[in-house]
Image (cartoon, helix red, strand yellow):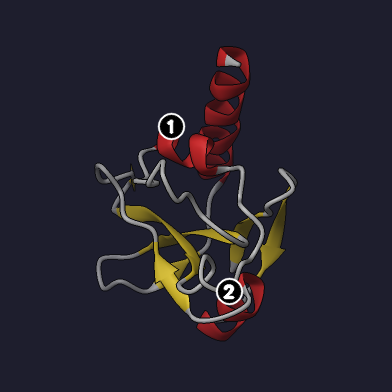
Amino acid sequence: MRALLLKPNLSYEEVQIKDYRDTRTLVEGNIELIPTTKDIKFGKRLLVAYANESGLMEHLPYNQWGTVLSEMGFYVNSMYGIAGNVVLLLTDDNGYDKSITDEVVILFLNAKNRVELAD
């Protein structure tokens, strides 16, 4: 599956993953779904973001993409933020992870540009 990996140092890259074990490897631990403030739909699929569920307690690096994720519709607590890597994927009606599309990448880049313009 095609996924987008958002790293704490403000770099990002497209990665290929096979299943949840690859997602766990990328976030360096157990995965936690980052909640959304609204459904972020692409056709019948929903955009989801996964992070390390213990990232803050494990003192993983602060992920500076939090503002961009908020701009996209994810709920990121401004007091705590996100620690460690974040993986973006789509899910189907049954909750199974699916590849991101070019539209997801465009949404991410547009949100990134809006946040940079606001700085």
Image spot of residue 86 (x, y percent): 57, 59
Q: Is residue 20 left or right of residue 39?
A: right
The label nearer to you, 2 versus 1, is 2
View extreme (bottom): residue: 21
Amino acid type of disc 2? Glu
On the image, numbered disc 2 is attached to which residue? 58
Element type where label 1 sits in the image: helix
User: In the picture shown, does residue 49 fall above or below 76?
Assistant: below
Q: Residue at x 30, y 49 (%)?
A: 36
Q: Is residue 47 left or right of residue 58?
A: left
- Occupied quadrant, residue 19: bottom right
Q: Residue at x 37, y 64 (%)?
A: 91
Element type where label 2 sits in the image: loop
Q: Nearer the viewer, residue 117 or 105?
A: 117
Q: Residue at x 47, y 49 (%)?
A: 81
Q: Residues within 10 Å of mark 1 (few under 14, many from 20)?
A: some
Q: Nearer the viewer, residue 62 or 104?
A: 62
Quarter of the image with the C terminus is top right
User: In the picture shown, does residue 50 fall above or below 13?
Assistant: below
Q: Which mark is residue 71?
A: 1
Q: Is residue 75 left or right of residue 26?
A: left
Q: Earlier in the sequence, mark 2 or mark 1?
A: 2
Amino acid type of disc 1? Glu
Image spot of residue 115 (x, y percent): 55, 23
